[in-house]
């Protein structure tokens, strides 16, 4: 008999990734690592105009080249149009199936697909396809204006309060389109056995991917299986399927052999989403003592010709500040570019760049310290939804961050702080990111050797999902993490949740707990039913399953699940849990968000136009942190992206051709190690039990949310130049 044992605490332990050894030894197989017998290679042909019509596609030369199996074009592959539906898990941002018509609406739009025995042969054949177009001048104008705008959030009378405010700010902010550049480019390996389609995919949501592909190909969903065991990051670019996937799938069905399609880095800039270009105008009205009286936030983002992608820049605006009069409006500007999509922190992150820049401008105008200005305008409830916050500790983030950074030593005078002959700039920003759950199912199998299998059709995009799932199950069962086998990345498993919106971790807690409870209940049922078992004949309700042990409620008998299984001569007992989502609830009781404060020090040497990020201090209120190592790693990655967003990243479209002209990692500059100082990351841990029993939120996106404005506010402090367009241009600082 086992001894009663209190829960051992795996939650909160800094554990290295359980999948780390597989990755560093090269054992982990990513999508493009799959080599199937008889596999063919597909290379898409992208349009070389951004607006026009395909008048002819001549494939004759390509078809005669060695190894070429087929060159598909309009009419050759039956791919259906679907109606995107987020709630039903049939979501895509680009709804047009490939080859649907002859109209070209963006540069790189797929017009043909070459398939051959080798990648080189397919590439040569794709290059040999001659496409003729009637071309028109595309609209890729970076200056944005919307014809129609709609009100996203409104309270009081923002215009009137603004007109009467003693101190006002009216400023416009631009953000260049950013392209996702995960190390792993989008890829599909598709194979068809005549009945069932298997797709190895780069996907942040394998269940949604399965549904979309089944519908596009006209197959029953149970005949499509999507596998994504390892993913080389996604950042939102892999939330929904893009059109290389149905192309590869339709090609494998047509040819009867496996097909691999891996996008090149330049193709990543065409047809797999991006953060759109964004123009925002912020008008703030305040009293002389720094109380906001009016906030107007108007944003316009680019979208593609056919799809209305709304960046939702006002997501954080209504709940960030206490202000009686507020109005947020949105608008779209159609451009001849591929369809935009979510990019890490969609909506709130670009929105906060605008509002947090404007708050800094207001602080300067009022002569009030920006930390103090935030403290004076911290709301007691979500004034947009008029409901309480589940847990909001932004003030503590601000004060702790200020303390860790040494903010009290700041001289607010522009350019007044010096070190080693350089000018210092100190800036800060507050931030927020939504917290919620998605529907998520998990199965758990308890085994007679003391190990446990936890399975869900969720996926680990590199964030540590394998590890936190093992930690959760180990915690709930009071066993070692090493005894937990986590099985994810296969759509045949119980339907899991997206790796998106920083919501997967929070979504997994309840179903794992429920699945364990169900397995425990089943085990108790078997024990009492078996006369020869130690609990034979007992009433089931006198027993409970606690810490992985069948325990007498009143007596002293305790039996670990593996002992119980062995006593029953059973190898396993299993249970399933079905977690309910909270995202998009019509009438939420609480406003659930994570919060943070970020402080940046830059050094500026005008003599040589050298701007460096010298220090970043971040404090986050993101609920209970399940694994500080993985959480810190998420935040650090997000900060690196934030430095890129502020200083480097921007997709440029050629006005004549509509082509993204910096479509490579040489020309599209991202932050590198040399651009990033040591990062000081703190979590203040207030468990958010409204979200789940562990109080965990999610940390995938919040680390990016205040970085760009904190950095550009620091640049203002050093140089006196207000950066209102991202990425920052050094020449503007001189
Ligand atoms: Mo995130 S932009 O939901 O991957």
Image (cartoon, rainbow, N blue to C red):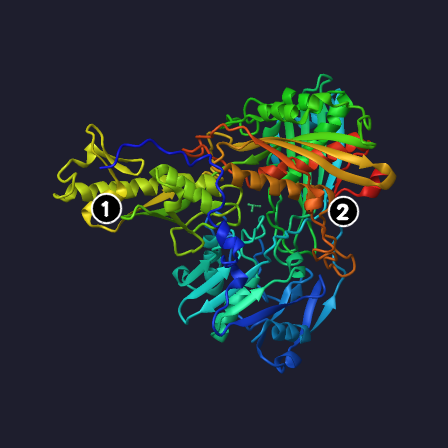
| Residue at x 63%, y 81% (from the top left corner) | 65
| Residue at x 22%, y 47% (from the top left corner) | 566
Say which element carries label 1: helix
Quarter of the figure with the N terminus: top left
The quarter of the picture where residue 620 lies is: top right
Locate residue 361, reporting x and y percent: 75, 28
Q: Is residue 378 above or below residue 191?
A: above
Marks 1 and 2 sit apart, C-alpha to C-alpha, by: 68 Å
Locate residue 496, reporting x and y percent: 42, 48
Q: Is residue 411 above or below residue 727?
A: above
In the image shown, does 536 or 587 lie closer to the viewer? 536
**Residue 164 visible in the displayed image:** yes
Locate residue 707, reporting x and y percent: 66, 36
| Residue 143: mark in rendering | 2
| Residue 565: mark in rendering | 1
Q: Residues within 10 Å of mark 2 (few under 14, many from 20)?
A: few
In the image shown, does 327 or 268 lie closer to the viewer? 268
The quarter of the picture where residue 136 lies is: bottom right
| Residue at x 28%, y 44% (from the top left corner) | 519
Q: Is residue 529 left or right of residue 42?
A: left
Say which element carries label 2: loop
Please report whichever mark, 1 or 2, sits nearer to the chain's N-terminal start: 2
**Residue 313 visible in the displayed image:** no
Q: Is residue 702 above or below residue 253?
A: above
Q: Residues within 10 Å of mark 1 (few under 14, many from 20)?
A: many
Q: Nearer the viewer, mark 1 or mark 2?
A: 1
The quarter of the picture where residue 693 lies is: top left
Q: Is residue 325 left or right of residue 564?
A: right
In the image shown, does 643 or 498 lie closer to the viewer? 643
């Amino acid at each position: 008999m086992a001894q009663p044992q209190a829960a051992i605490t795996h939650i909160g332990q800094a554990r290295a990734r359980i999948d780390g050894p597989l990755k560093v030894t090269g054992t982990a197989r990513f999508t493009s690592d799959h080599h199937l017998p008889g596999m063919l290679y597909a290379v898409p042909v992208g349009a070389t105009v951004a607006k026009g019509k395909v008048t002819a596609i001549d494939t004759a030369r390509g078809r005669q080249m060695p190894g070429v199996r087929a060159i598909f074009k309009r009419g050759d592959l039956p791919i259906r149009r679907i109606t995107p539906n987020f709630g039903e898990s049939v979501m895509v941002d680009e709804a047009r199936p490939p080859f649907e018509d002859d109209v070209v609406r963006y540069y790189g739009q797929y017009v043909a697909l070459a398939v051959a025995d080798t990648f080189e042969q397919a590439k040569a054949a794709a290059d040999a396809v001659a496409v003729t177009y009637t071309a028109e001048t595309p609209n890729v104008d970076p200056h944005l204006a919307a014809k129609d705008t709609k009100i996203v959030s409104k309270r009081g009378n923002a215009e009137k309060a603004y007109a009467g405010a003693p101190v006002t700010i009216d400023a416009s902010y631009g953000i260049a389109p950013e392209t996702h550049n995960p190390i792993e480019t989008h890829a599909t390996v598709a194979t068809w056995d005549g009945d069932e389609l298997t797709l190895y995919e780069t996907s942040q949501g394998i269940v949604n991917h399965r549904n979309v592909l089944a519908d596009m190909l006209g197959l029953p969903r149970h005949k499509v299986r999507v596998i994504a065991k390892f993913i080389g990051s996604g950042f939102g670019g892999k939330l929904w399927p893009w059109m290389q996937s149905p192309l590869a799938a339709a090609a494998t069905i047509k040819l009867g052999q496996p097909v691999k399609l891996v996008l090149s880095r330049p193709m990543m800039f065409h047809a797999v989403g991006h953060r759109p270009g964004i123009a925002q105008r912020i008008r703030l009205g305040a009293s002389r003592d720094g109380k906001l009286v009016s906030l107007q936030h108007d944003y316009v983002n680019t979208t593609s010709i056919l799809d209305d992608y709304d960046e939702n820049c006002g997501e954080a605006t209504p709940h960030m500040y206490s202000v009686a009069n507020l109005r947020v409006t949105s608008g779209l500007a159609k451009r001849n570019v591929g369809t935009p999509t979510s990019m890490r922190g969609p909506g709130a992150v670009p929105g906060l760049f605008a509002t947090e820049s404007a708050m800094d401008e207001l602080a300067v105008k009022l002569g009030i310290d920006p930390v103090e200005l935030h403290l004076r305008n911290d709301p007691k409830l979500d004034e947009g939804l008029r409901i309480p916050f589940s847990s909001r500790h932004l003030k503590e983030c601000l004060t702790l961050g200020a303390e860790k950074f040494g903010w009290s030593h700041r001289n607010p005078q522009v350019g007044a702080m010096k070190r080693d002959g350089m000018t210092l700039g100190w800036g800060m920003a507050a931030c927020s990111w939504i917290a919620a759950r998605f529907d998520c199912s998990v199965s758990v199998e308890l085994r007679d050797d003391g190990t446990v299998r936890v399975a869900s059709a969720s996926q680990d995009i590199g964030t540590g999902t394998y590890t936190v799932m093992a930690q959760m199950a180990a915690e709930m069962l009071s066993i070692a993490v090493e005894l937990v086998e986590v099985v994810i990345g296969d759509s045949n498993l119980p339907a899991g949740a997206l790796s998106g919106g920083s919501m997967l971790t929070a979504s997994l807690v309840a179903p794992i707990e429920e699945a364990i409870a169900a397995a425990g209940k089943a085990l108790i049922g078997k024990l009492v039913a078996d006369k020869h078992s130690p609990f034979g004949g007992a009433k089931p309700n006198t027993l409970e399953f606690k810490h992985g042990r069948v325990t007498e409620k009143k007596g002293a008998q305790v039996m670990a699940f593996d002992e119980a299984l062995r006593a029953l001569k059973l190898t396993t007992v299993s249970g399933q849990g079905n977690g309910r989502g909270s995202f998009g609830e019509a009438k939420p009781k609480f406003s659930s968000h994570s919060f943070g404060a970020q402080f940046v020090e830059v050094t500026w040497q005008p003599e040589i136009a050298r701007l460096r990020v010298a220090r970043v201090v971040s404090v986050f209120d993101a609920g209970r942190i399940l694994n500080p190592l993985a959480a810190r790693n998420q935040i650090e990655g997000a900060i690196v992206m934030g430095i890129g967003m502020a200083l480097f990243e921007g997709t440029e479209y050629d006005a004549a051709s509509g082509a993204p002209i910096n479509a490579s990692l040489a020309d599209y500059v991202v932050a590198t190690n040399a651009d990033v100082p040591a990062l000081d990351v703190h979590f203040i841990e207030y468990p958010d039990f409204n979200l789940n029993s562990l109080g965990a939120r999610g940390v995938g996106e919040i680390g990016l949310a205040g970085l760009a404005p904190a950095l550009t506010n620091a640049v203002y402090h050093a140089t006196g130049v207000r950066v209102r367009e991202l990425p920052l241009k050094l020449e503007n600082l001189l």
